């Protein structure tokens, strides 16, 4: 069984920073690729950032230049560094990942999410 869990959310003032983590655990070799989504109250889910298996990154225009993806050396955790946060960044953030499992198989997993609240 594999698990994916987000952490790092919280409340900050506008202009502040947070670092979200998306960590894989269980019978997993590592994270192959990750999509970070967010959903604000009453709004549609939005793809915020994506990290490919080749470590290419893509960002939504609304966060470009402020959010940065990275991963740890073990490739079991992906980070979303969020700087210069704005009230409109307030949302529930969650990651969905393609995982490399033992035995050369893959699986898609998603976490429960972490809430980010940015006050003006």
Image (cartoon, rainbow, N blue to C red):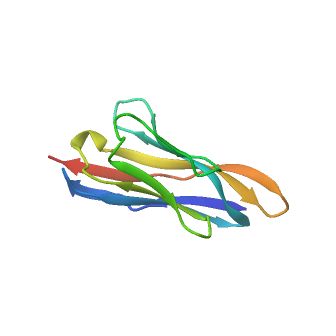
Q: Which of 35 and 7 is in front in this view?
A: 35
Residue at the limit of the structure toward the right, as seen here: 103
Residue at the limit of the structure toward the left, as seen here: 120
At x 25%, y 57%, the residue is: 11
Question: Percent from the top left, x then y, of residue 58?
Answer: 49, 41
Quarter where residue 41 is shown: top left
Q: Quadrant of the N terminus?
A: bottom right
Quarter where residue 32 is shown: bottom right
Q: Which of 46 and 55 is in front in this view?
A: 55
Q: Which of 101 and 83 is in front in this view?
A: 83
Whether residue 79 sits left or right of residue 100 in the image: it is left
Q: In this view, does 84 lie above or below 79?
A: above
At x 65%, y 50%, the residue is: 53
Question: Percent from the top left, x then y, of residue 66?
Answer: 32, 47
At x 63%, y 60%, the residue is: 3
Whether residue 53 sits left or right of residue 102 in the image: it is left
At x 37%, y 30%, the residue is: 43
Question: Percent from the top left, x then y, of residue 119?
Answer: 18, 49
Whether residue 120 sits left or right of residue 65 in the image: it is left
Whether residue 53 sits left or right of residue 6 in the image: it is right
């Amino acid at each position: 069984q594999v698990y994916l869990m987000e952490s790092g959310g919280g409340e900050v003032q506008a202009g502040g920073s947070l670092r979200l983590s998306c960590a894989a655990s269980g019978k997993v070799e590592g994270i192959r690729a990750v999509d970070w989504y967010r959903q604000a109250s009453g709004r549609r889910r939005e793809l915020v950032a994506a990290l490919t298996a080749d470590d290419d990154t893509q960002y939504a225009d609304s966060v470009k230049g402020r959010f940065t993806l990275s991963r740890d050396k073990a490739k079991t955790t992906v980070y979303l560094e969020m700087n210069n946060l704005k009230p409109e960044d307030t949302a529930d953030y969650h990651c969905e990942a393609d995982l490399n499992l033992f035995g050369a198989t893959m699986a898609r997993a998603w976490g429960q999410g972490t809430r980010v609240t940015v006050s003006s």
